[in-house]
Amino acid sequence: MISLERLLGLPHYEITGIEETGGEIWIGARYTGPRSCPSCQGERLRDKGRIERLLRHVSWAVRSVWLRLEGHRWQCYGCGKQFRERFPGVLPWQRASEAFREKVFRDHWDGVNRSRVARREHIGSATVERYCQHFLQRLNAERGNTVCPQVLGIDEHFFTRKHGYATTFCDLRNHKVYDVVLGRSELSLESYLQRLEGKHLVKVVCMDLASVYRSLVRKHFPQARIVADRFHVIRLVNHHFLACWRELDPDKAKNRGLLSLMRRHRHNLRPEQQVRLDAYLAQHPALKLIYRFKQRLCYLLLKKTCKRKRCEKLAPRLLRAIYQLRQAGLPHLVSLGETLHAWAAEIATMWRFSKNNGITEGFHNKMEVLARQAYGFRNFNNYRLRVRVLCS
């Protein structure tokens, strides 16, 4: 007899026959390992007749493999119950071995679309989806009920036109997605945050300048310190500055070359680009003052991992800049000053930390890839299951 343990990955089996019919391989086998009653684990069994199970197994090269497993119907002397023989490596009521089901799942996980996997293995597309759901639920169950991470990132991303947006909770310290919740409003997130475990362990929450998220964090994470995302703060400053420039010089603001120079940090410009920008600003003294103010403000906001004494020296500079913006008289600069004033504490906290929501944004790109591979999701629970497994 030939052992199938190494050949097919099934322990305690032996081959009783192999034949090829119509390009398919048919393998007869029987289980030779220990047997016990599934109810009482008793080993004193009585043979009540033979049974046979026909199963699909992992293909050899390009040829499909079928297993014809020979077994028995047993009756336990201990509890008196009758049962059909259990085959290791095969779940009850399944028509394929676990090795074949896992191979289908791995192929689909690696990026092969569902219809192509189905054609290759000569099964239905719904069967591929069912196998994938089974293993995704198993992998998700292996994670267990993890508590909330200490460093949490919160951001939104678009799900579908029907369901709208979803909120991502990301573990910034371990670089993985903690959970995804449908909705971004306080009403849609309230019930989830109320039953969230380990909220008292959260120390830092990083987010963009969204008032809804800030109020939720203050309510449900009272021990956490809110940190504004540096990228969104710098983008907000540039947005209002460019809007102000369009009001002062609408014709030149349409120049794509000048637009690229005005929006970038000065240390990223080449010498010839700095000369060109200085020549333009020399013709507009008021715009030159606003540009220099914007550069100083951005350099102030870019500082990070500062000690307490260093932050105490930077705080008056930030407050003075906010006061100047609110007194500027230009609508866009005043609006910027009001926003920075409302978020002054969260913005100042950026100086102490280097973490930001760039990790969360990176996972959003991966979620878009998952959605494209699946040609979109209609069921949010299926989408959430994939994200929790594949982005962890």
Image (spheres, grey):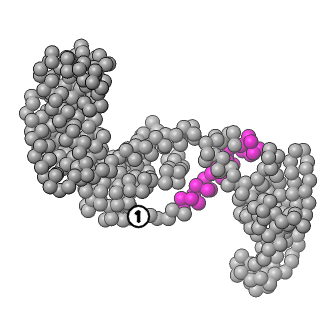
Asked if residue 82 lies left or right of residue 166, the reply is right
Q: How packed is label 1: few (under 14 Cα within 10 Å), some, or many (20 or more)?
A: some
Does residue 321 appear in this view? Answer: yes
For residue 283, above or below residue 41: above
Is residue 247 visible in the rendered structure shown here? Answer: no
Q: Quick one: 152 or 359, which is closer to the camera?
A: 359
At 81% across and 63% down in the image, what residue appears? 4
Please report the residue visible at 69 percent of the width from the left and 52 percent of the height from the top.
103
Dominant SS type (magenta): helix
Q: Is residue 283 above or below residue 14?
A: above
* The image quarter in which residue 29 lies: bottom right
Tell me which residue sits at (32%, 19%) in the image: 256
Residue drawn 23% across the image and 49% down it:
351
Left or right of residue 207, residue 66 in this image:
right
Q: Is residue 47 above or below residue 296?
A: below
Q: Amino acid at mark 1?
A: Val
Secondary structure beneath dot 1 equals: loop
- Of residue 117 and residue 216, the one placed in the foreground of this image is 117
Furthest-bottom residue in this view: 78
Q: Which residue is mark 1?
A: 147
Q: Is residue 50 magenta?
A: no
Question: Residues in magenta?
Answer: 118-141
Q: Position of residue 39 (x, y in %)?
A: 70, 78
Residue 255 placement (x, y as % from top left): 29, 16
* Position in image of residue 163 (x %, y %): 44, 41
- Give residue 71's quadrant in the image: bottom right
Q: Nearer the viewer, residue 341 or 262?
A: 262
Magenta-colored stretch includes residue 130: yes
All told, the count of numbered labels is 1
Q: Where is residue 228 drawn, in percent x and y?
A: 26, 47
